[in-house]
């Protein structure tokens, strides 16, 4: 081969070799990381998905087989815990396990293990025994969360109408306990005359025995509806609950309990008791759906089955929520209240059995 031929081959092979080397370097650049950067001045928490993708941000909560995670770029995310292959947290968080043990410290979760670095040393546990993660140290403020939806309807002109309403939820969650407080009420006037005055509140204190089963040693229901002739209905009781379906997109919980039922009426016919006292069996079911990452749909149904004096009652609430920002949402709600056997007033008026209410409002996440 002539020298000139060799030079021609050099002009061909040289660029080819260079392209191959550059391609190899480029390929190496896109290989998924096996661990987050060793140096992270902002102290992000890192999640590695089973797909190999990495997310950086902060853990807001892990429970019920899902994890809430905030990313500066993607906003608030709710991820299926099974889709998370690893978690690296340089922050001090609380890790609660099936045997009711609590570890507090920084942690690495990978290869089926939870490795927590505490002030007393490093503790290693099985990931399948992890029940929940609560951010931060055991401070009271870290246990609380809530949401308030305010409704307002105003009409002026030939008919003057105004109606106020609110739906509120407050939660206090520790690794093994939960306090639930819920309120749903409205007040309205037409032409300056009151036509709506309805208030429904419940409080439950739950203790988780397992990941899905919990007992409720203390619960209280309070109901008032002027136009159902109910001055005050109290239902203190206790019960238990079970999370039948626990999925990222679908959650279904059922509860059963026993209650003391006391109902005081605004007025009654002559010779009738103004207060009924007895017992009741309480059934409650909650179905939560997430058809889209920014849309939530929740159905709640409860009934009190009276034993002895009193009457059966039912309550239903459906809420469709569209998230605008991390703190604001637009909510549509439908409320149904029923008293199976209404008590007539002193004037002989028998209230309707069913009340319905459709409302729209702005929700504020606390």
Image (cartoon, helix red, strand yellow):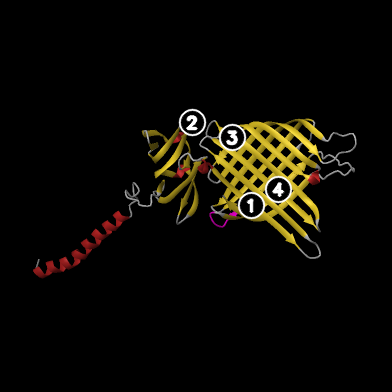
Which residues make up the magenta segment? 319-326
Alpha carbon of mark 2 to alpha carbon of mark 3: how far?
15 Å
Q: Tell me the SS state at disc 4.
A: strand
**SS at badge 1:** strand
Q: Position of residue 105 (x, y in %)?
A: 40, 39
46 with respect to 13 (left or right): right
Q: Specify which label sits upstream in the sequence, 4 or 2.
A: 2
Cα–Cα gap, marks 3 and 4: 24 Å
Lower sequence index among marks 1 and 3: 1
Q: Which residue is mark 1?
A: 149
Q: Residue at x 64, y 49 (%)?
A: 319
Above or below, 154 relative to 352: below
Which quadrant of the figure has residue 238?
Answer: top right
Q: Are marks 2 and 1 in contact (CB under 8 Å)?
A: no
Residue drawn 66% across and 43% down?
A: 300
Q: Which mark is residue 185?
A: 4
Q: Position of residue 157 (x, y in %)?
A: 79, 65
**x%, y% of residue 226?**
79, 45
Circle 2 packing at 10 Å, graded few (<14), some (14-19), many (20+), is some
Task: Using the numbered discs, state the Cα–Cα distance from disc 1 to disc 3 in whole angstroms.
Answer: 24 Å
Q: Are marks 4 and 2 in contact (CB under 8 Å)?
A: no
Please tell me the numbered disc located at residue 100: 2
Q: Residue at x 53, y 32 (%)?
A: 210
- CA distance separating discs 1 and 4: 11 Å
Asked if the magenta segment contains residue 8, the reply would be no
Label ID, residue 206: 3
The quarter of the displayed image where residue 220 is located: top right
């Amino acid at each position: 081969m002539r020298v000139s031929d060799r030079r021609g081959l050099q002009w061909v092979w040289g660029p080819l070799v260079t392209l191959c080397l550059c391609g190899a370097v480029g390929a190496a650049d896109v290989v998924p990381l096996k661990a987050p950067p060793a140096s992270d001045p902002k102290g992000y928490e890192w999640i590695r998905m089973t797909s190999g993708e990495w997310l950086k941000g902060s853990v807001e909560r892990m429970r019920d087989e899902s994890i809430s995670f905030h990313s500066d770029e993607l906003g608030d995310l709710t991820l299926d815990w099974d889709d998370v292959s690893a978690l690296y947290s340089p922050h001090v968080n609380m890790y609660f396990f099936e045997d009711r043990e609590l570890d507090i410290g920084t942690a690495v979760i990978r290869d089926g293990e939870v490795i927590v670095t505490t002030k007393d040393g490093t503790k290693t546990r099985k990931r399948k025994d992890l029940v929940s993660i609560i951010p931060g140290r055991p401070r009271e403020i870290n246990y609380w969360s809530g949401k308030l939806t305010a409704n307002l309807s105003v009409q002026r002109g030939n008919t003057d109408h105004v109606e106020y309403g609110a739906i509120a939820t407050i939660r206090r969650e520790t690794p093994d306990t939960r306090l639930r407080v819920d309120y749903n009420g409205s007040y309205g006037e037409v032409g300056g005359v009151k036509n709506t005055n309805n208030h429904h509140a419940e409080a439950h204190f739950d203790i988780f025995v397992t990941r899905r089963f919990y007992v409720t040693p203390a619960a209280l229901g309070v109901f008032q509806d002027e136009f159902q002739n109910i001055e005050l209905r109290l239902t203190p009781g206790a019960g238990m609950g079970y999370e039948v379906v626990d999925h990222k997109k679908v959650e279904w919980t059922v509860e059963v309990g026993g209650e003391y039922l006391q109902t005081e009426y605004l007025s009654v016919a002559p010779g009738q008791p103004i207060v009924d006292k007895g017992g009741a069996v309480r059934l409650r079911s909650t179905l939560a759906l997430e058809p889209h990452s920014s849309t939530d749909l929740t159905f709640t149904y409860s009934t009190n089955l009276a034993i002895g004096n009193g009457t059966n009652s039912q309550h239903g609430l459906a809420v469709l929520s569209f998230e605008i920002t991390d703190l604001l949402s637009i909510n549509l709600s439908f409320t149904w209240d029923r008293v199976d056997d209404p008590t007539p007033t002193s004037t002989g008026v028998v209230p309707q059995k069913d009340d319905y209410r459709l409302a729209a409002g702005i929700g504020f996440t606390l």
